[in-house]
Image: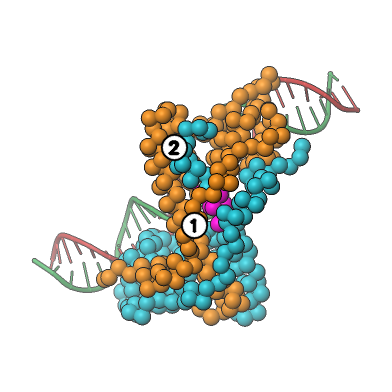
Chain colours: A cyan, B orange, C green, D red
DNA sequence: CTTTGCCTTTGAGCGCACTCAAAGGCGTAG
DNA sequence: CTACGCCTTTGAGTGCGCTCAAAGGCAAAG
């Protein structure tokens, strides 16, 4: 049997491309996305770090347990999040919400730890991820079109 | 403590908006996304259906088991996928890859089954999903910017 | 008749990413 | 001193979405 790809029928490629145009090239204004506000306190408790990042304290401890994160302790043995830790959490969060698995993030951070000579591997890893994000954007645009269609016919009575 | 949202700092909203512009309004050419090719056989085996949709036979059986799908049988008791079934599979797939949970898809399909009077609820459901997709698109654009940044500095040597 | 291959069912197992429970320590308020 | 709330650890539990295993049926090929 011929391989028809039902999910992206070749016939419709043009319409799809028109609906999911090439993304803008990188915007210099966004290059500071990992910067933190200047008024961020130097040391934060786990509750504060959780509040600011939108993660739970549970999740922050979990990330530390699996080696994604290193966090200092205060005199009482409590976790104390400095700017460096917060930067890393934000970085990790951004990759997570974009669908990068924890294992891959972990791998990337290990490569960073290993030093300068792993730069090409890190580059490759990020480029692969970039490609996956682009694919995901296309998938979302298509799903959005389907959703719009369903909304347009007011609930999708026609076909299921 | 003031609620700073580190993941979408208000300060950068403008740059972010510029990078993730409003999506195009619905494209009429895409309204036929759920149509199937004319040359699609009337009845397909599970292996053929899997091949065409990119899902596994396991997954197709699973979807049927949880009530997402109804499929007829041939004389031998084998599943036989007709156009109606294939349309539904494509629809389900599109919602799945866009991140809609199976429970929500299931709910939507139940509403369809209940008839015309559930149209408003279906509309609301799809609009919520549309909003989530938009949010996800924004997240992806941001992650893409971070990824681009990391690529630009050739592997992200600077900050982790 | 036997082999081969695709199909059936039920129920169990898995990987991921959390998420929670239990048991206990620190430090301030009353 | 005690109570309270936030913190600690380890280990176990949860929910989702598959994914597989076992045991067996159908049917064309040799």
Residue A35 covered by magenta stretch: no
Q: Tell me which secondary structure the magenta stretch mostly adopts.
A: helix
Q: Residue at x 45, y 49 (%)?
A: B130
Q: Chain of mark 2?
A: A
Image coords of residue D14 (percent x, y): 41, 45
Is B32 on the left-hand or right-hand side of A39? Answer: right
Q: Chain of mark 1?
A: B
Q: Considering only vertical position in the picture, is A21 above or below B1?
A: above
Image coords of residue A100 (percent x, y): 54, 60
Q: Considering only vertical position in the picture, is A4 above or below A35?
A: above
Residue that extends furthest to the front in the rendered view of this protein: B28
Q: Considering only vertical position in the picture, is B123 above or below D9?
A: above
Q: Residue at x 34, y 77 (%)?
A: A40
Helix, strand or loop at label 1? It is loop
Real-space Cα separation, disc 2 to disc 1, in angstroms: 21 Å
Of residue B40 and residue B21, the one placed in the foreground of this image is: B21
Residue A141 covered by magenta stretch: yes
On the same chain, marks 2 and 1? The answer is no
Image coords of residue A69 (percent x, y): 47, 70
Q: Which mark is residue A155?
A: 2
Helix, strand or loop at label 2? It is loop
Task: Give the extent of the magenta segment.
Answer: A137-144
Asked if the residue under mark 1 is in contact with the one under mark 2, i.e. CB atoms within 8 Å, the reply is: no
- Is disc 1 surrounded by few (<14), some (14 to 19) or many (20+) residues within 10 Å? few
Of residue A67 and residue A87, the one placed in the foreground of this image is: A87
Q: Quadrant of the N terminus of chain A?
A: top right
Q: Which mark is residue B23?
A: 1
């Amino acid at each position: 049997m011929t391989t028809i790809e039902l999910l992206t029928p070749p016939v419709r490629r043009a319409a799809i491309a028109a609906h999911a145009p090439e993304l803008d090239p990188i915007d210099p204004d966004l290059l500071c996305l990992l910067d933190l506000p200047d008024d961020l306190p130097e040391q934060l408790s786990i509750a504060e770090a959780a509040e600011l990042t939108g993660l739970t304290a549970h999740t922050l401890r979990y990330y530390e347990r699996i080696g994604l994160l290193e966090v200092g302790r205060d005199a009482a043995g409590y976790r104390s999040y400095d700017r460096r830790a917060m930067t890393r959490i934000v970085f990790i969060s951004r990759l997570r919400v974009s669908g990068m698995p924890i294992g891959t993030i972990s791998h990337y951070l290990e490569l960073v730890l290993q030093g300068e000579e792993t730069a090409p591997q890190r580059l490759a890893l990020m480029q692969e991820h970039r490609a996956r994000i682009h694919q995901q954007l296309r998938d979302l645009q298509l799903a959005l079109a389907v959703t719009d269609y369903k909304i347009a016919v007011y609930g999708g009575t026609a076909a299921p």
